């Protein structure tokens, strides 16, 4: 797998990810709990959610209460930048030695990381907020957040089926559960698929 082909994969993922995010951002307000989804097929829903934190909406200040929300967001943005740089460096260093699946996996993870970094770095600067209204691009009054404090746009949800845990189940007895409830985006999908490719692709070519 040549670096040129991997670059096309990375570019395609980033373009698709950003195109859908910008379309959602400029056409719909945020989907609050209880509101109708943009598209609702039962097993699939298209929403508009803004994630201020990490995967599943977790935030550093949830785990470390002594860190302020702004500090947690800044640390997360910086971590994403460093992680993307390291992944890109490792991709360049290993692409001609690794298996095709491993290289594609790294490329997908890098593309997904960059896709979400763009949201975090720039969306707060170039968009107005989407709370109860459709966002504006480059609003006169300025964006909704400073550089590196933007929110990641998520939209896909696959709540395929739900159940209620039996009362005898420890900790969760009597509570309802939906699979798969988290909301994610194309960048998140690329990262997840990339990890699967790396897991099953091995690390070195068979001679």
Image (spheres, rainbow, N blue to C red):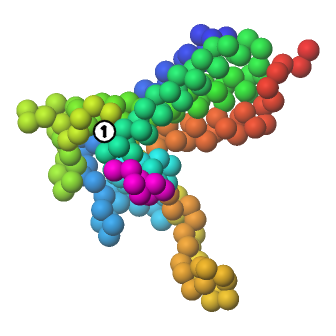
Queried whether the magenta region covers residue 15, the answer comes back as: no
Q: Position of residue 136 (x, y in %)?
A: 17, 38
The residue wearing badge 1 is 149
Residue that protrudes farthest toward the left in the picture: 140
Queried whether the magenta region covers residue 67, the answer comes back as: yes
> Would residue 139 be found to the left or right of residue 107 on screen?
left
Q: Nearest the camera: 4 or 175? A: 175
Instruction: Reply above or below: 68 against 121.
Output: below
Q: Is residue 102 visible?
A: yes
Q: What span is in magenta?
A: 61-68
Quadrant of residue 91 within the rendered picture: top right
Secondary structure mostly taken by the magenta-highlighted segment of the chain? loop
Which residue is at a point 46% across and 61% down the rendered structure image?
A: 41
Instruction: Reply above or below: 192 against 147.
Output: below
Instruction: Reply above or below: 184 against 97.
Output: below
Determine the secondary structure under disc 1. loop
Residue that protrudes farthest toward the front in the picture: 66
């Amino acid at each position: 797998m040549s670096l040129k082909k991997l670059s096309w994969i990375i570019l395609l993922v980033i373009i698709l990810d950003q195109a859908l995010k910008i379309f959602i951002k400029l056409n719909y307000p945020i989907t609050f709990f209880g509101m109708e989804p943009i598209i609702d097929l039962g097993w699939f829903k298209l929403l508009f959610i803004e994630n201020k934190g990490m995967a599943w909406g977790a935030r550093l200040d949830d785990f470390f209460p002594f860190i302020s929300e702004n500090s947690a967001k800044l640390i997360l943005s910086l971590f994403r930048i460093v992680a993307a740089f390291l992944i890109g460096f490792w991709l360049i260093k290993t692409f001609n030695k690794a298996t095709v699946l491993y290289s594609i996996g790294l490329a997908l993870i890098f593309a997904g990381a960059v896709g979400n970094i763009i949201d975090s770095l720039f969306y707060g600067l170039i968009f107005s907020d989407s709370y109860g209204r459709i966002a504006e691009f480059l609003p006169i009054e300025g964006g909704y957040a400073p550089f590196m404090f933007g929110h990641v746009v998520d939209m896909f949800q696959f709540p395929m089926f739900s159940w209620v845990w039996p009362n005898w189940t420890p900790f969760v007895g009597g509570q309802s559960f939906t699979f798969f409830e988290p909301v994610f985006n194309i960048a998140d999908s690329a990262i997840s698929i990339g990890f699967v490719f790396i897991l099953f692709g091995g690390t070195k070519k068979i001679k």
